[in-house]
Amino acid sequence: MSPQPPPPPQPQAANHTASMIDVSNASKSFGNVVAVSDVSFQLNAGVTALLGPNGAGKSTLFRMLCGLTTPTAGTVKVLGRDARHDTPVRGKIGLSPQQDALFDRLTAFEFVEIAAKTHGVKNPTSATKHALTLVDLATVTEKNVGSFSKGMRQRAKLAAALVNDPEILILDEPLSGLDPVQRNRMIELFHTLGSQGKCVLISSHILDEVARIGSEVLVIAQGRLAASGDYRSLRTLMEDQPHVIQITTNGARELGAALLQKEIIEGVTIEDGSLSVTTSKIDAFGRSIASIARELDVSLIEVTPMDDDLESVFRYLIERR
Amino acid sequence: MATVSPIRAITLTHNVLLKQLITKGRLIGITLFGLLPILLGWVIGRQSDDPLEAGVGFISYMGLSILIPVVALIFASASLGDTREDGTLVYLWLRPISRWSVTAGAWAASSTITLPLTVIPMTIAAILLDAGNTLILATILTAVLAGFAYCGIFLLLGLLVKNPVIWGLAYIFIWEAIVTSFAKPAAAIAVSGYSRAIITGRTGVEFERLFSPSQGTSIFMLIVIIAVSMGITTVRLSRIEVP
Amino acid sequence: MSIALGLRKPTQGAIRVLTLEPIKDGAKLRSLVSYGPERNILPDEMPAVDFVKHLAEVRGIPRKEAKTRASDVLWLVGLGEERFRPIGTMSTGQRQRVKLAQAIAADPQLVFLDEPTDGLDPLARDEVLTLIRQVSEEYGIHIMISSHLLEEVEQICDNIVVLNAGKLVVAGQLNQLTGQSTGIEVELVPIDDQPTAIDAVERSLRQAGLTVTREADSTVLRIQDGTSETPADLIRDAVAEAGARLHRIQHRRRSLEDIILDTSS
Amino acid sequence: MSATDNARILDRGYRQFDGERLGTRSAIRSTAWQTTRSIFGLGRKARHKFFPMAILGITYLIVIIQLAAVFLFGNETAGFLTTNSWEQVAPGIVMILFAALVAPDAIVRDQKNGMFSLYMSTPLTKPTYLAAKSFSVAGSILLITFGPALLYLLGKTIKGLGPNGVAQWFETFGRLTAACVLVSLFLCAFSLAFSCFTNRRAIASIVVLLAYIGTSVPSAILYEETNIGEKILLVNPIETAYEFGARLCNSPSIADNYGEITTTFITLGFIGWLLISCLILLVTYQKREAI
């Protein structure tokens, strides 16, 4: 089941001023445990996904961005300023933290409203209503947040992060605990926010969703930045990983032999009628597969690239280390 | 981008933290705890021949040195301490509001809940002692001042250590109760020393004590203690590792 | 799950688990069934092997047998070397394996796992999912998992029950409910030397009588199924004709997500 | 001679268990043993062992020193070994302190580390779970009540100061055992009941002690100050139970004001508090979600 392709990546806002998020050589260690070491990247408007195994330093990086903790080396700038000491810029950041704790004795409305008021939002009540409808909590505004399920708490956190219409949105696993319908709605929401010129940074473990959210990724492993950019171009950069393609056809043997003979592919395995080929010349393969099949009068029922998806890119980046 | 005015920030922090502090368990427990001084006040009132002297002694030992500090400890150490422990501090910290208004809001919330739960039972006890109005007024004044001061100290304690209740109890029952009775400089920073000085000053009942400042200095020192502990809390808040 | 375990009485209707009535003979049922709790909360200071042995004993396995089974099961879930370590020192992935180990130590006929991959990163999740699949296939233990992730369910489950706000949406065998082809997707790659290749392919497919849809300047052509019996050859010839670079031909199968989105809208 | 004919590859895979499954009884035994291990910190870091072990150690140390004194320096120092046996059970305050440490460790930890919902998914039910926990807690308390008394009894018997005649000896021994078991069960129920309101161990111990102070101080004051009469003393659970033990061993009352209360009222007070504790425990756990 391949995800329907994500929208084309936002054109990088070509403003010369400092990018919305600017991290240069940031490191963070707790005692002698290095959580983040020498990470540098710049982000502008649009949606970017931050990926990495557990304990790779994602949450620490997020906390540094919001100024919740200071980097031991390097600098972290949000909208050109340091969120830890610059009071006004904290009004432009919307954070949905990873931990599950909320003000349990407040109702959903009160919880989001307090976020609106402490952000100095003009009319907090309507902003709160709007935020709660965005996250599909309009029907339970008067219920105590403490009695909410994991998914509802997650949406309450999102509403609180959105209520002040921030320019920077930092969401730590925002979709965990949500059901498929809500997840789709949230993904659309992130798209619109990204296209409205906000800088949205999302961490997630569910790669199928990340691929739908956007194709811009930052991959962190053992505290270091492993890769950044569009994950499809990352895949093409990995020449040392040949592409694996599965072909369902009625002439597996003939097609395999022809492709081998024409040196388009390096390896082939045939399993009950379906052909699995490995090739590092993906361009040549793409151009010639149809014509070769036509010559042999062999029909191509399905041609499926097996390791082009985000999960394979992620696996190659993490496991290769 | 609007930054929120300090007064508004203080009231908002106060409202949120107050709601979080009021739990059924704490309320029932502490109101029951408050009945004890009332019962003892009534007993002493009936029994003792010089109620004023016995009353001042009882109010300063039972009320000012046990009831108020313990209740203040439970609420003030939890107001910011709990938000750091469970991770909700970020919802007050990552806001365009100044740090000191968060401290002031937390201090106000702790006082709003601590004072009624301590001053009221102590005033009733003072009345039951029927040793005249001076004692009742003195009790109210000192209880309120002591309440504010203890809330300040334990608010700071909540952000300094991992389990503030244990350290707070050590402060109340070891530092204030024992150490101050033989080390003069220790008494200089113990709230109970000043609150005792104020109540004895106002009621004219004298206790032979190591350290007896005048009423004026005592009130001034309590205010200094409040200001200093809120100042350190604010610095601590801006330097803290927010979960 | 708590109703199936006999921990909560259904307000109406009846339930049978392994032919037993959960409320009436709860104790007997719960010695044949076991449970992996949702959140990752486990006794941190307890060594993993003691934790698994103790729960096996409580589920009715004699002491000596429980001791050997605990070690065997921890080896099987890949925690052989770490089995003496306290659970608190383990990663989220390892803790999920310990939960799985305690669930199968008492040789249950049925295991309930509540969100077994919650909080795991993609690699750890795949390992746990393959482990769960292995447990049900090779060890002959029926497993019921609850999950929000449809891709995960489609990856390892045979049957599904979909609930929405407490009501049943759909239930049945996965391969019957999903998999019907709902059209073919042809993805091409833009190439400089043949800029018009993709349009050419689209045109020739339309001429061949296939209904083709394509979003604005997208490189994916969606072809409705069932119009003609050999769309594959038409596609192949169109692509070869235009000299376009083929990336993917895939039958769009009706996925679990399509079912849920259809039924809930 | 082919070496391969005795070569075999053994299947190390998963083994079914087709032996006979033990019932709830073995589940209770295993849970009780596991709880006792955790109470005395076996299999856990040393700092968990400190408090319960300290109190046990001190109590037994005092007993051994006294007995050694009697054996070394002859009978004159045996004055304290009075004929009746209830006197030598550890004083009430030590017992409630020990119970306030042991009970929270047994049930409060299960709430925080997920074990409670795991236990509920086994053949154990809420009542059998609480029974298993009570066996462990009562057993530990028995260590501190029955142990010292038994040592004293043996010491007296060897020195010839014990009850004369085998029949009397067994009667004293029987009464002592019954009293210690009942008082330990009482303490177990009381401390468990007051430690199931919170999921933090330190707070639970404080609540148990406050429950003791909250009942004993007012009842003592009201007895002194007003003329309600001696029955108000029954409001104090620990001294009532302690007095009940004394009455069972028909040894002198623990204090003269308790002496004024008739045995029937003492028994009623004992049973009343026992029922209250069990009620609190069962109702709180009944409301608790299993998963």
Image (cartoon, helix red, strand yellow):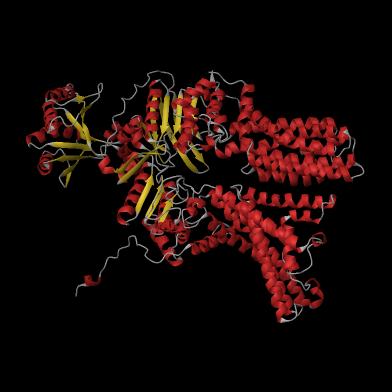
**Quadrant in the rendering for residue B62:** top right
The answer to whether any part of residue A188 appears in the image is yes
Rendered view: C96 above or below D6? above
Rendered view: C2 above or below B140? below
Q: Say which of B197 and D240 sits in front.
A: D240
Q: Residue at x 66, y 62 (%)?
A: D184
Q: Residue at the front extreme?
A: C12
Q: Residue at the right extreme?
A: B49
Determine whether, in the image, residue D266 is placed left or right of residue D124.
Answer: right
Determine whether, in the image, residue D158 is placed left or right of residue D79.
Answer: left
Residue D98 location in percent, x, y?
67, 58
Q: Residue at x 33, y 49 (%)?
A: C130
The answer to whether any part of residue D91 appears in the image is no
Residue C95 location in percent, x, y?
44, 50
Q: Say which of B203 and D210 sits in front.
A: D210
**Quadrant in the rendering for residue A219:** top left
If the image is split into quadrants, where does the C terminus of chain C sit?
A: top left
Q: Say which of A259 and B128 sits in front.
A: B128
Q: Residue at the bottom extreme?
A: D165
Q: Say which of B230 and D128 sits in front.
A: D128
Determine whether, in the image, residue C25 is placed left or right of residue B186.
Answer: left
Q: How many marks?
A: 0
Residue A265 location in percent, x, y?
16, 40
Residue A38 location in percent, x, y?
44, 35
